[in-house]
Amino acid sequence: MITAELLTNLFNIETLIGLVVGVVGGMFIGALPGLGATMGIALLIPITFGMQPTAALIMLTALYTSAIYGGSITAILIHTPGTPASAATAMDGYALTRQGRGLQAVGISTFASMTGGTLSAVALLFIAPPLARISLMFNAPEYFLIAIFGLTIIGSLAGDNMLKGLIAGVAGLCISLIGFDITVGVARFTYRISELESGIQLVPALIGLFSLSQVLIQAENIEAIRRGEKTEINAKLEGRLLPTLKEIITALPNLIRSSIIGIFVGILPGAGGDIGGWLGYNEAKRWSKNKALFGKGSPEAIWASEAANNAVTGGAIIPLVTLGIPGSSAAAVLLGGLMIQGLTPGHTMFSDNANTTYAIILGFMFANILMGIIGFLIARRVAKVANAPTGILAPVIVVLSVVGAYAINLSYFDACVMAAFGLLGYFMRKTGFATAPVVLAIILGSMAEQGFKRAILMAKDENILAYYFGRPICVVLILLIILSLAAPLGLKALEKKMSKTPVAGADTDSDD
Amino acid sequence: MAGKRKINNDVYIGILLTALSGFLFYETSKIHPEAAQFPKVMIAAFIIMSVLLVFFGIRKTLNPALTLKSDTLLKFRVIRTPLIVFGVVVIYLALIRFTGFFIATFIFVPVFMIFYGVKSIRALILTDVLLNLFVYGLFVRLLKVMLP
C-alpha cells in the first residue's frame, strides 16, 4: 500500500541524487573492462553509510542494473563485454557494429535492458512479499541451514573448482569467528589486538577483496599499459539509436520471454547474468525465423540477451530480501549494504520496514527506466570510457578504497585490513578461489553460529540430526543444499553448450 | 624417459591450508569450551576440505589432464608486478600514518601514475588535484569524515 511515508522516502532530493549517481556511475563502471557491478557496489557502500536506507539502497541497486547495461555498450562497440553478463550480446552486437549499425545495436540494447530490468522490478514487487512470509516459519535450526544454503550458493559461483569455492566459504566463516563471542563474552582469535575484538569489519574486507584485488590483477598487464595499448572505439557510429515502434512491437514476445527467463535465472541460486543472457539468446534463436542470422548480427539476439541479463538483477534481489540468500556475487555485496543500513532480510522487510522496502523496490523500477532514458542520451560517450587509461583509474580506485575502508569506523586499522584482504583476494583469484564466498560467510557467520547453538539447546536430549530431520522446512532446506551443491555441474554443462563461440576480449576478471 | 613431473599448485595450497586449519583447531583448545563449540565444527570442516584439496592436487599431478585453468595462474613472473604495486600501497598507508591523508595522497597519486607509465604532466596534476578535491568535498565536507 502506498503511504505518505513511502512517498517521502522515495521522492526526496537525497534519493533522487542516489538514483542518478547509481544509474550513471553504474553505466561507466560497467563499461570499463575489468570493473563491474560487484566492485562498484563495494566502492559505493562506504558513501551510503551516512545516507537514508532508501536512498542508499536505491543507489546500490541502480548501480547493479546499470553496470550490467553499461557492459553491453562496450560489448557491442568494441567487442569487449564490460561484464560477463554481456558476453552473449558481444557476438551479434559487434557484428552489427562492423556492418555500420552499431548505434542501432546500442539502441536495442538500451530498450531491452530497460524493459528486462523494469519487468524484473515488477516481479520483485509481487513475488517477494509472499515469499518473505515463509521466513515467519523459520526458527534457529532453519536459520542455521539458511546460512549454510547461502554459502553453498556462492560456492557454486566458484569458477571451475567447487571444492575451492566451499573452502573459501569455510575460511570466511573462520574469519567471522574473530572477535568477542557474544553468548559467553570471551575473545576468540584476537591475539591481544584490541581492534580485533569487534571482529573483522565487513566493508574493509569486501573493498579489499573486490576493489584492491582488481587493481592488482590489472597490474599484471602493466607493460601493455605503459606502452599505452588500448582498443580504439569505432569512431564512425552511424545508424539510428531509437528503435521504431514497429521494431518494438515485433520484438515484444521475444522481450517478454527473455525477461521471464532472466527473472527465473536470477532467482535460481548460483546462476548469474551471464547464464541469463545465454539462455535468453538460446531461446530467441530457437523461436526465430532467422536462425542463420544469429552470431552474424541479429537484432533479435540482442533484444533477447539484453532483456534477460538485466532481468536477472531483479530476480537475484528476490531471494536476497526475502531469505537473505544472494543470487549472485553482486547481490552478496548488496546484502552487506542492506545489513549496514540495519535492514534484516525476511518478513520484517515487508512488515516493520515495509515503507523502506517498497520505496527501494519502486526506486529500483525507476532506476531501470531512468537507465534507459540516460542510456539513449549518453551511450556514445559511455563507450569512450573503455579507453580510460588504467594509469589514472588504478590510483583513483586505491585512494577511494583506502578512504572507504577508513570512513566506516574512522579506523586506520580498517584501512590496513582492507589492504590485507586486497592481497588475500588477489592470491585467491590467482589460485582459483572465488572471493564472494568469503564476504558472504562473514555476513552469514554470526547467523549460522547463533542458529547452530540455539538449535542444540532446542533439541535438548534428542539426537541433533533426528531433530533436524524431524522439521519439514529443515528437510526441504537440506535437499536444497544438496541440490545447490549438485547444480553447478548441470549449469556449467548448459553454459558450455550454449557459449560455443568464444568472445574475444571478453572480460573474465569481473565477478558479476 | 618422461620429464620431471610438475607438482600441481593445489598440493602446496592444500598443505598450507591444512597446517593453518590444524593450528586454528589447536587454538580452539585455549578458548572457553562453549565459545569453542562452533569454531571447532567449522575448523574441522576446513581441515577436511584442505586435505581433500591435497588429495585432488596429487590426483592432478599424477594425471595432468585433470588440471584446471585456475590451477595454472600463479607464476612468479606474473605476480611480481602486482606484488610491487601492493608494496607501493603499503608505503602509501604508512605515509598516511606519518603525514596525514592528503599529503600522502598528494605524493602517492603521481608516483603511482608514473609507475603505470603516465607521462602527461597535465594528467598527473589534474588527477592528483581533482581526486584530492573530490575526497575532501565528499568525505570531509559532505559526510563529515575526519580523515587522518
Image: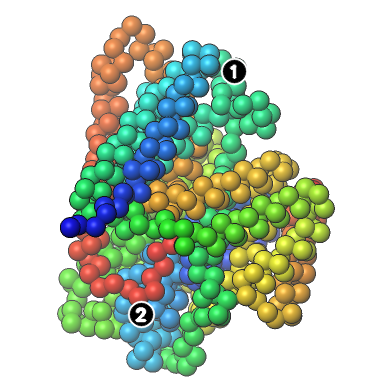
> Which residue is at a point 40% across and 51% down the rendered structure image?
A431
| Amino acid beneath label 1 | Val
| Residue at 39 percent of width and 78 percent of height | A79
Chain on which label 1 sits: A
Nearest to viewer (mark 1 / mark 2): 1
Q: Position of residue A249 (x, y in %)?
A: 31, 78
Query: Mark 2 is on which residue type?
Result: Gly
First in sequence, mark 1 or 2: give its number: 2
Q: Residue furthest front?
A: B1
- Residue appearing at x 51%, y 34% in the figure: A175
Structural distance between the alpha carbons of marks 1 and 2: 58 Å
User: Residue A432: image x %, image y %?
Assistant: 38, 51
Q: Position of residue B6 (x, y in %)?
A: 30, 53
Q: Which residue is mark 1?
A: A186
Q: Secondary structure at mark 2?
A: helix
Residue A30 picture location, percent across and down? 49, 67
Res A472 visible = yes
Classify 10 Å Cα crowding around label 1: few (below 14), some (14-19), many (20 and above): some
Residue B57 sits in quarter: top left
Left or right position of A198 against B54? right
**In the image: residue A509, left or right of residue A470:** right
Q: Which residue is mark 2?
A: A93
